[in-house]
C-alpha cells in the first residue's frame, strides 16, 4: 500500500528538492528516486554480421568446328565462397552490484550474436557452340561445363549471457521527523534486482544458388553462322518508305545432350539444334482508313521471334490493328486500322432521359473515334425508394450489374444510346420520380489494345 502511494505521488515530486517535510509530501524526493530502475555495470555489445561470400565466375563460352580429332573443353563455372560466420555477442561488464540503494536494479544484458553472411552463388558453366559434319564426331568431345557449387551461409554468432544479480531483494528504511518526537515515523520499502537478459543468437546466412550448367548448341554445317539482327526500332514514316532488313537464326530445343558427348561430360541436358534462318526486308503496308500522316510520329519495334514469326510493337501514342506475313524474303506488316491512344478515353456523359421502357442514357464520343473502335458498356444501376433530400444515407439497391447486351446499344454519329429501359429486369425501378445512380464503364479495344473509362450519373428519372 505504501509503495502504491509512492507511485501516485511521483509525478508531483519530479524535480522537487527540499530539506524540510511538507504537508502530504514527506519524503517526496525519496519517492521520486525510488521509482527509477537503474542498470549497473555496462551492457554487452552485439557481434558484427559476417561478410557475404563472393559469387563464382562464369565459365568462358566457346565455339568449335569438329573433325573427329579428340578435344577437351574445361569451361566450368567456379564455386561461390562461403559466407563468414557472425561474430559472437560480447559479454557485459557486471561490475559490483550497489548495496542497500533506494531504487530497483537491473543487471546488464549480454550482446546478441551477429548474423552469418550469405553464401555466394556458383558461376554458370560456359556455353559451347559446335559445328560438325559427322554427328559421330561429337563423341570425341569431352566437355566440362558444370555450374559452380554454391557457397554455404555463415553460422550466426552466439549471444552472450547476461549478468546475474548478487542480491535479488533488500529493504531500506526511511525515517522522517525528529527521533523521540511525535512527528517521527519510519517506513520500510522493498527493492529488487532483475537479472540481465542473454543476447539472442544471430541468424544463419542463406546458402547461395548453384550455377547453371552450360548449354550445348549444335550446327550441322562447318561454316560459321552469319550474324543476326532480329530486332529493329524505326520511325513509322521511314519504314513505310524504306524497308529494313531483319534476320534471325532459328533453334529447336532437344533433350539428352550429355549422351551425345564423350563419357563423363557434363553440360545442361537440354541442348539447342540449328534448324534454319529467317531473313528478309521488313516493310510497312498502311491500309488503315486514315492516312499515316494523320497520326503523330513515333518508332515501331519489329522483331523476328524465336519461332520465326514477325511481331510489331507500335508507339504508346498509337493503337493499331495489324497482321504480318512472310513471303520469301519479304516480311510485311499490314495495318488495317489505327487510332490515337489519347482519343480512346475521350468519352463524356450525354444525359439520361425518359422512364420505364423508354429510359435511355447517352454517351458522347468527343474524339469521333466510334467508327474505328470496338466499344462495350458495363452498367451498374442502383435505385432507392428514399428521397436523398430528406435522408442523409439513402439506401440504394443494385438492380443491374453486367455488360449491356449489344442489341441495346445504338450509335448515331458519335452518340451512343443505351436502352436501359429494355433491360431484362423488372421495370418498377424505372418509374417516374425514382432516384437512381448509374455507373457506366466503357471498354474500348482495337487489336491487342484495350482501355476502360468510367462515367457516372446520379439523379431522378
Image (tube, grey):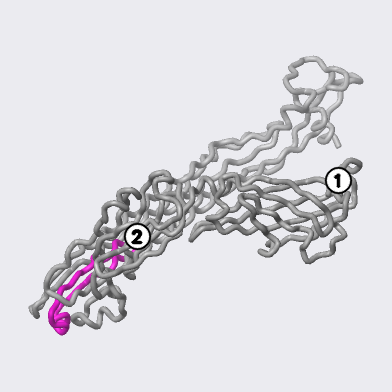
Residue 442 placed where, x, y %? 63, 54
Closer-to-camera residue (185/443):
443
User: Residue 406, relative to residue 365: is it above or below?
Assistant: below
Q: In this rendered view, identify the residue nearer to me: 228 or 236.
A: 236
Task: Report the residue at 78% width, 26% height from top.
Answer: 11
> In the picture, residue 375 is in which quadrant?
bottom right
Q: Is residue 75 left or right of residue 292?
A: left
Q: Residue furthest front?
A: 413
Q: Say if the magenta span includes residue 135.
A: yes
Which of these two is toward me, 228 or 103?
A: 228
Q: Which mark is residue 162?
A: none
Residue drawn at (30%, 58%) of the image: 283
Q: Is residue 364 magenta?
A: no
Residue 326 placed where, x, y %? 31, 68
Instruction: Determine which residue is flagged by label 1.
Output: 393
Residue range in magenta is 122-150
Residues tagged 2 and 1 counted as in contact (Cβ below 8 A): no
Total labels drawn: 2
Residue 333 appears anywhere in the view: yes
Where, by quadrant of the figure, is residue 82 drawn? bottom left
SS label for mark 1: loop
Label 1 environment density (alpha carbons within 10 Å; few <14, some 14–19, many ≥20): few
Residue 354 place in picture, x, y as percent: 81, 52
**CA–CA distance between discs 2 and 1?**
61 Å
364 lies above or below 282: above
Q: Quadrant of the N terminus?
A: top right
Residue identified by numbered label 2: 121
Frontmost residue, 233 versus 412: 412
Q: For the point 38% across and 56% down, which residue is it?
A: 286
Amino acid at each position: 500500500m505504501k509503495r502504491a502511494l509512492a507511485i501516485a505521488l511521483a509525478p508531483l515530486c519530479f524535480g522537487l528538492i527540499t530539506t524540510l517535510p511538507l504537508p502530504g509530501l514527506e519524503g517526496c524526493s525519496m519517492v521520486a528516486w525510488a521509482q527509477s530502475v537503474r542498470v549497473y555495470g555496462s551492457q554487452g555489445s552485439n557481434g558484427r554480421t559476417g561478410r557475404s561470400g563472393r559469387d563464382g565466375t562464369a565459365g568462358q563460352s566457346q565455339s568449335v568446328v569438329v573433325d573427329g580429332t579428340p578435344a577437351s573443353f574445361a569451361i566450368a563455372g567456379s564455386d561461390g565462397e562461403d559466407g563468414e560466420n557472425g561474430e559472437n555477442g560480447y559479454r557485459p561488464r557486471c561490475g559490483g552490484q550497489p548495496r542497500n540503494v533506494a531504487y530497483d536494479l537491473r543487471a546488464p544484458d549480454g550482446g546478441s550474436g551477429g548474423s552469418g553472411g550469405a553464401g555466394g552463388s556458383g558461376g554458370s558453366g560456359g556455353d559451347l557452340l559446335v559445328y560438325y559434319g559427322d554427328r559421330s564426331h561429337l563423341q570425341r568431345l569431352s566437355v566440362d561445363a558444370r555450374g559452380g557449387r554454391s557457397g554455404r551461409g555463415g553460422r550466426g554468432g552466439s549471444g552472450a549471457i547476461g549478468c546475474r544479480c548478487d542480491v535479488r531483494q533488500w529493504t531500506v528504511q526511511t525515517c522522517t521527523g525528529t527521533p523521540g518526537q511525535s512527528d517521527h515515523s519510519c517506513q520500510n520499502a522493498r527493492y529488487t534486482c532483475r537479472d540481465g537478459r542473454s543476447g539472442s543468437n544471430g541468424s544463419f546466412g542463406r546458402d547461395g544458388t548453384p550455377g547453371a550448367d552450360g548449354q550445348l548448341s549444335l550446327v550441322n554445317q562447318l561454316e560459321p553462322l552469319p550474324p543476326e539482327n532480329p530486332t529493329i526500332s524505326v520511325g513509322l514514316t521511314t519504314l513505310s518508305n524504306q524497308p529494313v532488313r531483319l534476320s534471325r537464326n532459328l533453334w529447336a530445343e532437344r533433350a539428352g545432350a550429355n549422351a551425345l558427348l564423350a563419357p563423363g561430360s557434363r553440360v545442361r541436358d537440354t541442348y539447342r539444334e540449328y534448324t534454319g534462318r529467317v531473313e528478309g526486308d521488313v516493310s510497312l503496308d498502311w491500309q488503315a482508313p486514315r492516312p499515316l500522316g494523320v497520326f503523330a510520329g513515333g518508332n515501331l519495334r519489329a522483331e523476328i521471334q524465336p519461332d520465326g514469326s514477325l511481331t510489331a510493337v507500335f508507339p504508346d501514342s498509337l493503337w493499331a490493328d495489324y497482321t504480318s506475313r512472310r513471303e520469301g524474303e519479304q516480311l510485311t506488316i499490314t495495318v488495317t486500322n489505327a487510332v490515337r491512344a489519347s482519343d480512346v478515353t475521350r468519352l463524356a456523359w450525354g444525359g439520361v432521359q425518359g422512364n420505364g421502357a423508354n429510359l435511355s442514357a447517352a454517351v458522347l464520343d468527343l474524339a469521333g473515334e466510334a467508327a474505328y473502335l470496338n466499344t462495350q458498356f458495363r452498367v451498374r444501376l442502383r435505385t432507392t425508394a428514399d428521397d436523398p433530400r430528406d435522408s442523409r444515407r439513402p439506401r440504394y439497391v443494385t438492380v443491374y450489374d453486367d455488360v449491356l447486351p449489344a442489341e441495346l446499344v445504338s450509335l448515331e454519329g458519335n452518340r451512343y444510346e443505351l436502352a436501359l429501359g429494355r433491360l431484362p429486369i423488372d421495370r418498377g425501378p424505372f418509374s417516374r420520380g425514382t432516384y437512381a445512380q448509374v455507373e457506366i464503364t466503357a471498354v474500348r479495344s482495337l487489336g491487342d489494345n484495350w482501355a476502360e473509362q468510367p462515367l457516372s450519373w446520379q439523379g431522378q428519372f
